[in-house]
Image: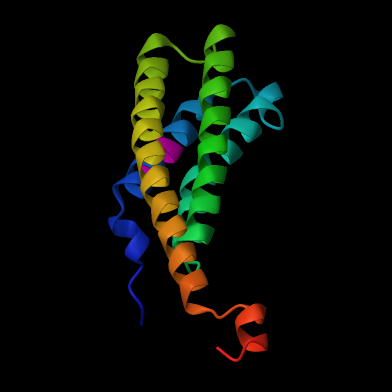
């Protein structure tokens, strides 16, 4: 059976920890927020590691870059929802600060990973274009 290679990615490990931390922190949110803010924050937090896994399980760097881009968007949503939750007093300083720091740390590392993968995808695309003859080449008998 194939090993889950994504588990060795530092960005996935950090995203997984952040998602778990968000789930624990939102456990005490007001009950009237269970289908609103609680659900939205949890879904956004879980979307980050999920998109990393899905992208890493696809073929090619272009697909991986697309899913990392989605993960970055979800992380931005998490950051805003944490800020919003803190503004309403749903998170105390001891909960908010580690969550915000974790999200910022993950964001920096995820962006660097995205840049590396995007660069590799461009190289991959360039190499595949060089290997494929164009229609004009076929017409000229090359």
| Residue in the foreground of this view, choosing between 28 and 94 | 94
| Residue in the foreground of this view, choosing between 81 and 113 | 113
Magenta residues, as a range?
A: 16-20
Residue 72 falls left or right of residue 139: left
Q: Name, please, the residue furthest toward the front.
A: 140
Residue at 46% from the left image edge and 63% from the top image edge: 126
Percent from the top left, x then y, of residue 50? 51, 52
Q: Is residue 85 above or below residue 16?
A: above
User: Is residue 17 magenta-colored?
Assistant: yes
Quarter of the rendering containing residue 98: top left
Percent from the top left, x then y, of residue 73? 57, 36
Percent from the top left, x then y, of residue 41? 58, 31
Percent from the top left, x then y, of residue 79? 51, 24
Q: Is residue 14 above or below residue 119?
A: above
Residue at 36% from the left image edge and 82% from the top image edge: 1
Residue 79 falls left or right of residue 98: right
Q: Quadrant of the C terminus?
A: bottom right
Residue at 52% from the left image edge and 70% from the top image edge: 129
Residue at 45% from the left image edge and 61% from the top image edge: 61
Residue 88 falls left or right of residue 53: right
Q: How is the image coloured?
A: rainbow
Q: Name, please, the residue furthest toward the bottom.
A: 141
How many numbered marks, from 0 up? 0
Magenta segment main secondary structure: helix
User: Is residue 46 magenta-colored?
Assistant: no
């Amino acid at each position: 059976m194939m090993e889950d290679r994504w588990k060795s990615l530092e960005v996935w490990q950090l995203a997984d920890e952040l998602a778990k931390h968000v789930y624990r922190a939102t456990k005490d949110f007001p009950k009237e927020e269970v289908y609103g803010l609680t659900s939205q924050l949890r879904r956004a937090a879980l979307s980050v590691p999920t998109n990393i896994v899905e992208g890493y399980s696809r073929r090619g760097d272009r697909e991986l870059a697309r899913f990392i881009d989605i993960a970055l968007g979800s992380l931005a949503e998490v950051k805003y929802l944490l800020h919003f939750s803190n503004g309403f007093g749903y998170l105390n300083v001891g909960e908010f600060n580690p969550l915000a720091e974790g999200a910022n740390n993950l964001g920096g590392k995820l962006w660097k990973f995205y840049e590396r993968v995007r660069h590799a995808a461009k190289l991959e695309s360039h190499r595949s274009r060089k290997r494929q003859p164009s229609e004009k080449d076929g017409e000229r008998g090359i």
